[in-house]
Image (tube, rainbow, N blue to C red):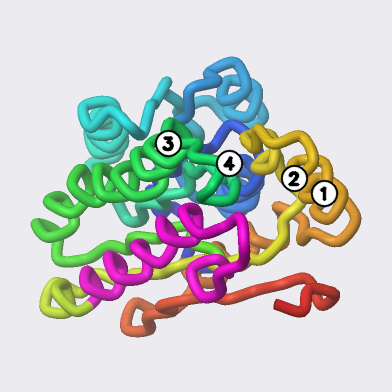
């Protein structure tokens, strides 16, 4: 597999898609550097593998210096970076008329600025080495808007623009870009919803019908495992029971 011995940095790796992707890529022989705020979970994940294969560091994607430090750790340890996976994200959905302005700002900070901080940290290394791949967790919400999802979807539509602009700008440097856009996924993402009724509805739907985190992780692995001249620019995936 093309994954073996690649150096991959993953944010939001303490649970869900990030943790599952760490497991899948490390099992395939990658060197993985993972970041999140919950370092105890990162340590538990890293301890499953041979010493030095999975490194971890406390990372807050809303802090540019924190993201830079994680990426620098990977480069210092392994001498290059093959893949950055911007996976950290929040989904405290609510209708605009609820005026949860603090939650809007938090989503913008994590879902948009966190991605940009990751790109800003990794891209100079990739430009210098004339290769690399930047992957970001987007969403079906980056394609379809529903009542209650306007701000969240807005952050995901922004990722569509950012990632496609990056793709076009970095053709000459052979840097690949990929958006992973899942529908409902059975992870902890619903826990950030503060409206009790909305939270209960989304939790029920994701637990009963959502994709597994491992299924999304395999999609990430598929995108990485392609020949260097092949760019998988987006993978849009839903549970077969999800209509929209």
Tell me, for residue 87, which label it has, or none: none
Q: Which residue is mark 3?
A: 101
Residue at the front extreme?
97
Q: Earlier in the sequence, mark 3 or mark 2?
A: 3
Residue 7's place in the image compared with 166, above or below, is above
Q: Nearer the viewer, residue 182 or 10?
A: 182
Q: Horizontal and vertical percent for residue 170?
A: 16, 72
Tell me, for residue 198, which label it has, or none: 2
Q: Do the numbered discs 3 and 4 sit on residues whose CB atoms are within 8 Å?
A: no
Q: Do the numbered discs 3 and 1 sit on residues whose CB atoms are within 8 Å?
A: no
Q: Do the numbered discs 1 and 2 sit on residues whose CB atoms are within 8 Å?
A: yes
Q: Secondary structure at mark 3?
A: helix
Q: Which residue is mark 1?
A: 201
Q: Which residue is mark 4?
A: 92
Q: Secondary structure at mark 4?
A: loop
Residue 80 visible (yes or no): no
In which quadrant will I find the C terminus? bottom right
């Amino acid at each position: 597999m093309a994954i073996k011995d690649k150096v991959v940095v993953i944010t939001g790796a303490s649970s869900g898609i990030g943790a599952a992707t760490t497991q899948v890529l490390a099992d395939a022989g990658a060197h993985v550097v993972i970041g999140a705020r919950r370092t105890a979970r990162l340590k538990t994940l890293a301890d499953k593998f041979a010493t030095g294969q999975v490194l971890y560091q406390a990372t807050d994607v809303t802090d540019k210096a924190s993201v830079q430090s994680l990426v620098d750790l990977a480069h210092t340890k392994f001498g290059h970076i093959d893949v950055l996976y911007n996976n950290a994200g929040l989904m405290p959905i609510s209708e605009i008329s609820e005026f949860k302005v603090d939650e809007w700002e938090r989503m913008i900070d994590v879902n948009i600025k966190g991605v940009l901080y990751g790109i800003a940290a990794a891209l100079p290394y990739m430009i210098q080495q004339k290769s690399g791949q930047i992957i970001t967790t987007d969403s079906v919400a980056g394609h379809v808007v529903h009542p209650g999802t306007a701000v969240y979807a807005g952050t995901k539509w922004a990722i569509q623009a950012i990632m496609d602009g990056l793709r076009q700008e970095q053709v000459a440097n052979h840097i690949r870009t990929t958006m992973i856009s899942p529908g409902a996924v059975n992870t902890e993402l619903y826990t950030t919803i503060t409206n009790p009724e909305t939270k209960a509805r989304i939790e029920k739907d994701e637990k009963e019908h959502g994709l597994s985190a491992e299924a999304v992780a395999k999609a990430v692995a598929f995108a990485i495992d392609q020949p260097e001249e092949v760019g998988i620019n987006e993978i849009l995936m839903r549970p077969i029971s999800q209509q929209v």
